[in-house]
Image (cartoon, helix red, strand yellow):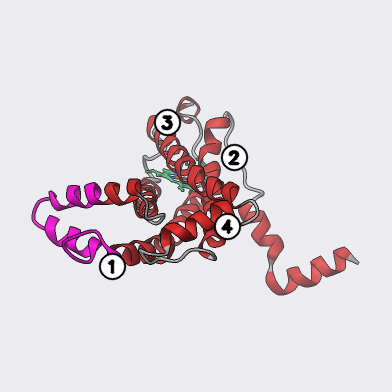
Amino acid sequence: MRRAVATWLDERCGWRTLKRVLLDRKIPKGVGWLYTLGSISLFCFLLQVVTGILLAMNYAATPDQAYLSVKYVTEEIPMGAFLRGLHKWGASAMVVFATLHMLRVYFMGAFKYPREMTWIVGLAIWLLILGLGFTGYLLPWDQKGYWATVVGTKIAEQAPFLGEEIATLLRGGAQVGAVTLTRFYAIHLLLLPACLVIGLLVHLFLVIWHGISGPPDRERR
Ligand code: HEM
């Protein structure tokens, strides 16, 4: 019965082919734990999506409600502190693992021909991850987040040529305030995740398309 349902679905959606292409891939000899850093980063991303959706269900992005809504999640909702902790530590874990993955790729020379585009898309992904960390930090609307954003946008202001325009665009004015919170909320929940999903789809497509490179000494043999 199960097999019949699986075949019925396969003939209509081709999921067996999808499984073969995505999961039953040949990998080169000699790959080890260092090659799991990309998948760990992917796991962190999925964790951030799930915990972020649950947090967003109880969050209010206004200066008078933001702090209280985060306090409510932490103190009133069952397992709310755990949920918040997962999202907070998950964010740091994602930065750490994506950076370690990037270093693995760099030191093993896996960015070379024909994987330059995988590397370039990876760099964009890394910047998007940092952007998610920066915009998320303001959302609890506490002293730490507020002053970190003041400092961060002041740094952006120092950039040559377009610095002031970029900082004003981010803040929605000359000061960090209500508009900044709304902007960071929209950037954190909509803009950056949408760009990241597109970037990751392209990245993973390229990884599957080229196949994973072997360790450098084995490539030479
Ligand atoms: C959330 C972020 C990221 C995810 C989920 C991700 C995912 C993956 C996965 C699953 C692989 C295949 C397995 C592996 O080599 O670990 C891979 C390979 C690769 N990634 Fe990433 N990656 C991310 C960030 C980056 C960054 C920041 C860079 C570089 C700037 C990068 C460059 C590459 C390259 C060049 C490969 C091919 C490696 C090879 O063929 O040996 N990735 N990525």
Disc on res. 50: 4
Mark 2 or mark 1: which is in front?
Answer: 1
Mark 3 or mark 4: which is in front?
Answer: 4
Q: CA distance from mark 3 to mark 2?
A: 16 Å
Q: Residue at x 10, y 51 (%)?
A: 160
Q: Which residue is mark 3?
A: 108
Q: CA distance from mark 2 to mark 1?
A: 49 Å
Q: Which residue is mark 2?
A: 27
Percent position (x, y) of residue 200? 46, 55
Q: CA distance from mark 4 to mark 1?
A: 26 Å
Secondary structure category for the residue under label 2: loop
Q: Which residue is mark 1?
A: 179
| Badge 3 or badge 2: first in the primary sequence | 2
As rendered, which of 49 and 88 lies closer to the eye? 88
Q: Main secondary structure of the magenta part?
A: helix
As rendered, which of 191 and 181 lies closer to the eye? 181
Report whether residue 132 is seen. yes
Q: Residues within 10 Å of mark 3 (few under 14, many from 20)?
A: some
Q: Amino acid at mark 1?
A: Val
Q: Residues within 10 Å of mark 2 (few under 14, many from 20)?
A: few
Determine whether, in the image, residue 156 is placed left or right of residue 56: left
Q: CA distance from mark 2 to mark 4?
A: 30 Å
| Badge 4 or badge 1: first in the primary sequence | 4
Mark 2 touches mark 4? (CB < 8 Å): no
Q: Residue at x 74, y 72 (%)?
A: 11
Q: Which residues are magenta?
A: 150-178
